[in-house]
Image (cartoon, grey):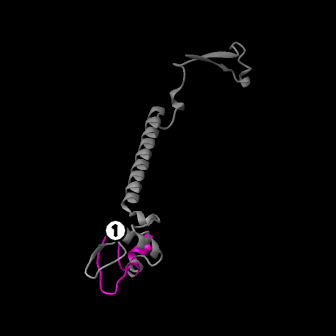
Amino acid sequence: MAALQNWDPSYEDLVDRPKLRLVTQDSLHQGFRQGVPVRVRVAQRKARRQRRQRIALVSAVVVSLAVLALPGSAFGGTNGAGLPGDAALSSQLASGTTYVVQTGDSLQSIATQVNPNNVTLVESLLKHELGSDVVVPGERILIP
């Protein structure tokens, strides 16, 4: 490969020389190149990019697993009785537990213990669970 190079005008005193000279690959001085060769820099850049991509992928997987490990109530979900997750932990009767009916209990009093915020919802769920409006002392009820 060859290139043409303009001759510097300060060399005007050299009249017998042409104004343009032919520069070949062999005549280039290799001392001008400094630092790491281009192919090494390209390989290093590629390795850094791959490392960043791997780190991003691993981070995304870890965050996804952490989110999946949290219960649904942590994101504003509700339990089976329609009670928000934070209130479900503080209620006396949790969803999925078995309650033994005491004397003096009614569906409304049990529903109030399960979800004091929405008694009618829990009461209708209890009616559906029992199949009637009447509770008998000693009866076992699965809290919805």
- Residue beneath the point at 48% across and 33% down: 38
Question: Whole-percent x and y of residue 64?
Answer: 40, 54
- Residue beneath the point at 34% across and 69% down: 131
Question: Whole-percent x and y of residue 101?
Answer: 29, 81
Q: For this rendering, which residue is in front, 35 or 110?
A: 110
Question: Whole-percent x and y of residue 144?
Answer: 36, 69
Total residue callouts? 1
Q: For this rendering, which residue is in front, 57 or 134?
A: 134
- The verdict on residue 134 being magenta is no
Q: For this rendering, which residue is in front, 45 or 56?
A: 56
Q: Is residue 65 above or below residue 30?
A: below
- Residue beneath the point at 49% across and 38% down: 35
Q: What amino acid is labelled 1 in the image?
A: Glu
For the residue labelled by badge 1, is the local secondary structure a helix, a strand or a loop? helix
Q: Which residues are magenta?
A: 84-108
**In the rendered image, which quarter is residue 138 located in?**
bottom left
Asked whether, in this view, residue 82 is left or right of residue 137, the answer is: right
**In the rendered image, which quarter is residue 53 located in?**
top left
Q: Is residue 33 above or below residue 19?
A: below
Residue designated by label 1: 129
- Residue beneath the point at 37% across and 81% down: 106
Question: Whole-percent x and y of residue 97?
Answer: 30, 73
Query: For the N terminus, which image quadrant?
Result: top right
